[in-house]
Amino acid sequence: MVFWTLNAVFSVVKTVTSVQEEGIDGRKGSMYPVEDQVTDTGVMAALYALLVLIEGGLWVWKARLGRDIMVEKPRERESVGSMRLV
């Protein structure tokens, strides 16, 4: 989860820095204008944030599932005649 969080933070920083350094209209005649770079890094930041939420949710879900299994009471044994049922 740390990996996705750091990537999201770095993508946001890269997006903000690109806009501040060159402006949204910078590199207009180039093959990769700033506007496209801002869009690309913004989408990457959003996807990384989504991955953080998904992995965090899975982490919480697994932790709760593990705790529920440990709290579960053992089943009682019943006997019918000479046979024991578990």
Image (cartoon, rainbow, N blue to C red):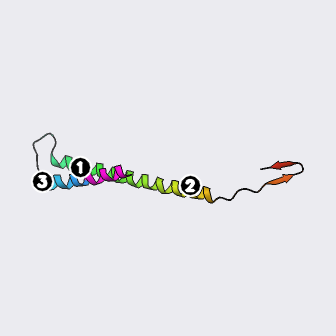
Would you say 65 lies left or right of 58 here?
right
**What residue sits right under mark 1 in the picture?**
39
Closer to the chain start, of discs 2 and 3, is 3
Which residue type does callout 3 highlight?
Glu
- Where does the image place residue 6, in percent across and percent down from the top left? 31, 52
Q: CA distance from mark 2 to mark 3?
A: 49 Å
- Where does the image place residue 40, in percent across and percent down from the top left? 25, 47
Which residue type does callout 1 highlight?
Thr
What secondary structure is found at the residue carrying circle 2? helix
Closer to the chain start, of discs 1 and 2, is 1
**What residue sits right under mark 3 in the picture?**
21
For mark 1, does the 10 Å Cα neighbourhood hold few (<14), some (14 to 19), or many (20 or more) residues? few
Residue at 16% x, 42% y is 32
Closer to the chain start, of discs 1 and 3, is 3
Query: For residue 48, which numbered disc appears in the image?
Result: none
Magenta residues, start to end: 1-11
What secondary structure is found at the residue carrying circle 1? helix
- Where does the image place residue 49, in percent across and percent down from the top left? 34, 54
Residue at 46% x, 56% y is 57
- Where does the image place residue 41, in percent across and percent down from the top left? 25, 49
Would you say 84 lies left or right of 52 here?
right
For mark 3, does the 10 Å Cα neighbourhood hold few (<14), some (14 to 19), or many (20 or more) residues? few
Residue at 16% x, 48% y is 34
**What residue sits right under mark 2 in the picture?**
66
